[in-house]
Amino acid sequence: MRCLLAALFAALGLTGLHNPAFGADYELPTLRGSSMFVPAFPTYFSWQGLYAGGQLSYTSASADFTGASAPLIAFSLQQLAVLNVMAPNTWSVLGISDTGAVGFGGFVGYNVQWDNAIVGLELNYTHSSVNAVAPSTPLGREGVVGGLIDDVTVDASASMHISDFATTRARFGWGIGHFMPYAALGLAFGRADVAVTTNVTVVEKDPSKQVPNPNPPPATVPLVVGTFIFPNSRAKNGAFMYGFSGGAGLDFAMTENIFARGEYEYIQWGRFWSIAPSMHNFRLALGVKF
């Protein structure tokens, strides 16, 4: 009997191994928690590579002309003692001009990416019409020079028109999904048309000689012994300018290859003919990643 049962179970076991329908219902036992977990690698949106685009901008500019008249006035009066005694070249006849203008341009650059960190180099160009005209306040003062009374009047005008400028800058960004906030720092280059004009009038009077005053009182005034006018000017078209730039912005990837941008940039130009201009640039742009 025992031999018969053993033969029966052996036959059933062999049948299950060779019968797929029977074997499909039979599974070897497994220990709970024995399956291996393989974590997925993190993914980052790619800003790597070459890119280019176009932009619209608004520039708020300021030009400090307060020192622009000094060199011309000093040159005009260099042979006269009035320059040392009364120093009319230090008089602030010109002021600060604030102006604004719209512009357009383009940019091209290249990004290198490590995970979320992005570092790039970009050339940014803007064509605009920033026209700064100095406010002018003529000044007149009187002083004693060499025993004579000198009545000195100084007038001046100045302007600066910036038409084209560009920046070469390094960008430092951080990828957050399809957004990339960044900071930028670089050098600025531009062209400008600059003009400065001065006019100095010196009226010399002899206090030892009195003549009737046509508009009394007083009854008499010092005798005018000479009137001298010293005009001077200089101008340059397409003058080269340079400075530094800094700013920040945000790139947003609309698709895998198209992105939009908003940014702010500050440019401090170097002094040109004692004129110190600066710019605040606000830009909206659309670009393509290649």
Image (cartoon, rainbow, N blue to C red):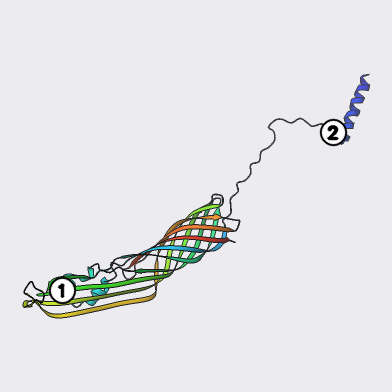
Which dot, 1 or 2, sits closer to the camera?
Answer: 1
Farthest front residue in view: 215
Say if 21 sits above or below 225 in the image. Answer: above
Q: Amino acid at mark 2?
A: Gly
Camera-side residue of 278 and 113: 278
Where is residue 204 shown, x and y percent of the image? 14, 77
Which quarter of the figure has residue 71?
bottom left
Image quarter hosting the N terminus: top right
Asked if residue 9 shows in the view, the reply is yes
Task: In the rendered structure, find residue 23 and report the number of the disc placed on it.
Answer: 2
Task: In the rendered structure, find residue 94 and report the number of the disc placed on it.
Answer: none
Q: Provide the secondary structure element on which disc 2 rests.
A: helix
Which quarter of the figure has residue 33?
top right
221 on left or right of 64: left
CA distance for labels 1 and 2: 120 Å
Q: Amino acid at mark 1?
A: Asp
Q: Residues within 10 Å of mark 1 (few under 14, many from 20)?
A: some
User: Tags 1 and 2 in contact by the CB under 8 Å rule?
Assistant: no
Task: In the rendered structure, find residue 151 and report the number of the disc placed on it.
Answer: 1
Asked if residue 125 shows in the view, the reply is no
Where is residue 134 shown, x and y percent of the image? 31, 68
Camera-side residue of 91 and 182: 91
Image quarter hosting the C terminus: bottom right
Q: Provide the secondary structure element on which disc 1 rests.
A: strand
What residue do we see at 94% from left, 22% from top?
4
Camera-side residue of 1 and 256: 256
172 on left or right of 91: right
What residue do we see at 48% from left, 66% from top?
104
Where is residue 233 shown, x and y percent of the image? 29, 77
Camera-side residue of 35 and 218: 218
Farthest top residue in view: 1
What residue do we see at 74% from left, 31% from top?
30
